Amino acid sequence: MEIKDFTIGYLKNEYKKRNISPKEVLDFVFNRIRLYNSKINSFITLTEEYAYKSVESLKFEEVDSKPLWGIPVAIKDNMCFKGFKTTCSSKILENFVPIYTATAVQRLIDAGAIIIGKTNLDEFAMGSSTENSAFFTTSNPWDVERVPGGSSGGSAAAVAARLVPLATGSDTGGSIRQPASFCGVVGFKPTYGTVSRYGLVAFASSLDQIGPFATKVKDAEVAFSVMSGKDDMDSTSHPYEFSHVDKNIKEYRIGIIKELYETKGFDPEVLDSLNDVIGLLKAEGVKVDFCSLPHLEYSLPVYYLVATSEASSNLARFDGIRYGLRVEGKDVIETFSKTRGQGFGSEVKRRIMLGTYALSSGYYDAYYLKASKVRTLIVKDFERAFKEFDCLLCPTSPTTAFKKGDKTNDPLSMYLSDIATIPVNLAGLPGISIPSGLDNKGLPIGLQIIGRPFEDNEVLNFANQLESIINFEAQPQLGGI
Amino acid sequence: MIKRETILHVANLARLELKDAEVDRLKDELGKILNYFTKLNDVNTDNIEPTFHPFPINNVYREDIIKESFPVEEVLSNAPNCSLTYFLVPRIVEEKDGN
């Protein structure tokens, strides 16, 4: 057996021709994990026994009807999968075994996907490097001294290292797109509400969204088409139905976001790569122009006030009573405080404190309410831009992957690595990161494409064509496939 | 600047027990972060409605029909402490001396 390509299209085609079997692909996947995971540390839990059992129950006659028939998938460890630990990379949930499965995960399984394990993240998805995991830091497959980005760093690194062809992530301020950018893979954050959040451990409910990682845009589209759609278990889920569009790239009017181009803090090589893409698009006859989103510079404070406020409220459920860690105190209040004081790591505590402060009596108007009003202005900036443009382009992150430890002592500089992804969550828009090249250190650079709400299909169609034009084929030097 | 007492007050609201070193660090870090956030005051938000959610959503109603729930044993399976069909919790009501 030989696997030449780690895409859904290739694997399914080989399955149909009976050249390879899903069991052989599982052997291949777990063999690669045994070879390389000790360097990368993507996985918190492997579900090997389950995976082999579930390939046995695949029926060959369903290979055409099930879009993910026999495709191995890794799940970010903040999404519930019944009977397997869901830790959120936190000590407070270290031994938590959910009694139900997240809707998005169930839809992948129903489409024939084989869950092979749960991946590392920044604790409760709070972070941009996976260094906030209570267990271990994931390494970037392109340079193991560097971070894979975060919070979905385990999933991004697993796909980049070709340990698995497909993985899920969640994105509250960039947690899918920024690690995709750092790891040289595709990461898609769909429109808010298109994928049910039932079974996703909540961080900031008005921003959280589930999406896929893959090596190609087409695969992200397949996974999204499977996961999306109305779910009665999530009252914010939208009656969305995905439909593929086939529109020539020339028909798109593209806006380059000035505020994420002319700003200090963006690596010149990252901007060079964007300029190369602009050149490629113009050569194809695509109309490209600058657009301005004047309130974008306020995104970071707005985001960190909104997200931490929502988080401080969402994380109140971790009290040591019904599940998770309990540290006994002399009364119930002391039990809550000790449990939370010992169970949460420093970034989670920092954000709970910030959010509690922003919501507390006397500060609510100045912080949370003010931020929510500026959020309106950011949403309106996007609405204005989308009257003139079909998709907006910018770098996914100001830099390529940074070294472990570089930003751990400076929360603000860590927050700044999400400056280009955060506004997209505030407005609930679809955004995708695709690799656009390598810098002089050989590290991947990511390009972000943003679309109108519920025009996820347009973003994916444009990204798919741009991906073929850029033709990024590089892989980390682990032993490529 | 943010006062040490403010950190302790907020930590109590959030039911977070913090070590002294954590209080000191949070005092510095939150001070810096909140100071950076004051840049929001540059924006005029008179007559601007707040956005609490990306899209307008309404309350979702459903018929009040009894459906199957999770079995009690499963729900209790993650409990740090339970007995029969109950979660066991620390004392909530204070005991009077001598009673």
Image (cartoon, coloured by chain):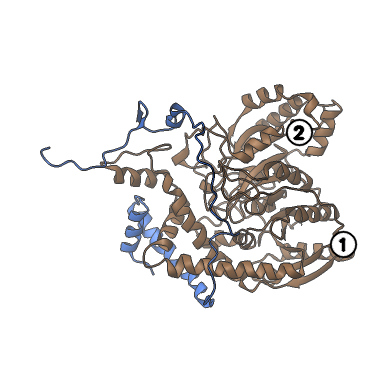
Q: Quadrant of residue A295?
A: bottom right
Rendering colour (chain A): brown
Q: Quadrant of residue A213?
A: top right
Residue annotated with mark 2: A66
Q: Position of residue A116 (x, y in %)?
A: 65, 32
Q: Quadrant of the N terminus of chain A?
A: top right
Q: Which residue is depicted at the point 70% across and 37% down?
A: A164
> Given contact means CB atoms under 8 Å apart, are the residues at marks 1 and 2 in contact?
no
| Residue A109: percent from left, percent from top | 67, 33
Compared to residue A68, the image places residue A252 above or below, namely: below
Residue drawn where x is 51% and y is 61% of the image? A306
Q: The C terminus of chain A is located in which quarter? A: top right
Q: Residues within 10 Å of mark 1 (few under 14, many from 20)?
A: some
Q: Judging from the image, what secondary structure is the residue with disc 2 in? A: loop
Q: Is residue A208 left or right of residue A243?
A: left
Q: Chain of mark 1?
A: A
User: Could you tell which of marks 1 and 2 lies nearer the N-terminus?
Assistant: 2
Disc 2 sits on a residue from what chain? Answer: A
Which residue carries the number 1 mark?
A250
Side of A346 relative to B20 (left or right): right
| Residue A64 against residue B21 in the figure, above or below | above
The amino acid marked with disc number 1 is Lys
User: Picture coordinates of residue A477 (x, y %)?
Assistant: 74, 43
Q: What residue is rendered at 81% in x and 48% in y? A: A473
- Say which element carries label 1: helix
Considering depth in this image, is A11 or A361 the residue closer to the camera?
Answer: A361
Distance between the Cα atoms at labels 1 and 2? 33 Å
Chain shown blue: that is B
The foreground one among B84 and A327 is: B84
Which residue reaches farthest left? B98
- Give above or below for A123 relative to A425: above
